[in-house]
Amino acid sequence: MFRLKYLLFLIPLFLISCVDEDPMLGMGLVDDTDKLNVNKYDNFDIKAFVFHEDSLKTSDYRYMTLGSYYDNQFGLVKTSIYSQVSLSSSTIDFNYYKDNSDSIVLALSYTGAFTRDTSIKTMEMKVEVFELTESFDDSATYYKKSSLQYNSTPIASQTITISPKDSVLINGGKLPAHLRVNLGNDFLQKIINAGSFSSNKSFLEFFRGFYIKLTPTSNTDANGIIAYFDMYSSNSGMMLYYKDNAGRTQKYNFVFDQTSRRFTHIDYNFSSSELTQFASKRKSITDTLDCNSETGKIHLATLGISAAKLNINDLMQWYNDSTQSIGGFNQAMLILPVNEDYITSVGGTQNIPSKIICYRKDDSGNLVYIHDAFTAEQFMGTYDKASNSYKMRITSHLQNYLNGNVKSSDIYLMPDSRTSTANRVVLNGPKHSTKPAKIEIIYTR
């Protein structure tokens, strides 16, 4: 049989009938040499390595994280926020509020939170708000280790209850759940004594922005919490409350929007965790942890904690082996089983990533989506509860490698929503003794 040098994709034909059919019907009319034999191969020599994602961009996203969390698998992660806050009007004269101002409040609208025990609905944490003394660079991109100078004396420091599901009563009205911090009279006086501003730019030159931290109230706090916020929500911003001429409470809103810059700063402590080796390494993509023993595990986490690289050592050799007589690929699937011990230790799959994304490196060494990304809805890397695994179609990626269109078959694995959630999961490595990560190819010959 003539062996194709290029992969052909076979589109399955589904015959729908209301009666049973004889599966051998018509087979006697086909010469044996013309029959297609469908085969499956899943014994590739795959190597997996976990690395610390060093260059995670965190600037100017709508959804942000804030808090502190620890577990034995991934160690300690802390996220904090640097942000400008903008006028909601083109100009403003704060002299109007000098005699009728009441208070000034910072608010962040919740979209959820990450805790080890998902039954925990609230947690006491310490919130600190500082004033920036260094301005944002309008042209800069900010990453997870970026920072700006700030006044070491906080504008506000208090213990609050993080409660992402509970609505808030304000002036007799009920609003969706959001974090509220009263910034105090000293800061209120600073704002209302600032005079007038002819533009938002001039206001940002006066007030450069906030640095916000959220930490456990003591070292005995179990695990901690990382809260999720929608910066564009109408309930996020800074509110200046005042009385109008009729004595009614009104407010002027400062907003987080496209004109106000922001970024998340992320700190790590991997000591006493399964990723402890990262503590002494350079924490870059070239420093990896080997996941290739019978007990090897692949750690994947958002917030730049960890990602993974898969190397398929013998793919080209297998393809070039003439004994396979490959006619074409029906499908190539990457299957990543979730480690059952990890699921037991965290009490379920509620906090694992909803999706794992596959990347490759382009000719410049940048990570880009593989060709199959977002093209096969059924196998886009989402978690499959029935098999307790993630499944990704990688057919086009392997085709492009075998045809010489891409230089490497290597696949890089990263969780979805890397800057807006704290989700994490532990997968079985490719040499796992009972349920390994694998690539399964269905082909004809």
Image: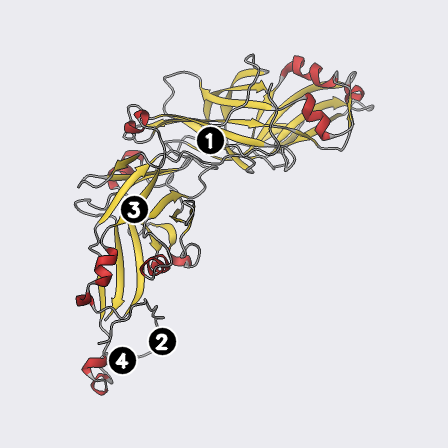
Disc with the residue nearer the chain's start (2 vs 3) = 2
Q: Which residue is mark 3?
A: 310
The amino acid sitting under disc 4 is Glu
In the rendered structure, the answer to whether residue 209 lies left or right of residue 4 reads: right
Question: Real-space Cα distance between discs 3 and 1?
Answer: 24 Å
Residue 365 lies, with reference to residue 245, above or below; the image says below
Question: Real-space Cα distance between discs 2 and 3?
Answer: 39 Å
Q: Position of residue 340 (x, y in %)?
A: 25, 41
Q: Are marks 3 and 1 in contact (CB under 8 Å)?
A: no
Image mark for residue 189? none
Q: Residues within 10 Å of mark 2 (few under 14, many from 20)?
A: few
Q: Which residue is mark 1?
A: 144
Disc with the residue nearer the chain's start (4 vs 3) = 4
Residue occupying the point 37% across, 51% down? 381
Front label number (2 vs 3): 3
Helix, strand or loop status at disc 3: strand
Q: Which residue is mark 4?
A: 21
Image mark for residue 16? 2
Helix, strand or loop status at disc 4: loop
Which quadrant holds residue 78?
A: top left
Q: Position of residue 167 (x, y in %)?
A: 56, 32
Residue occupying the point 26% across, 41% down? 339
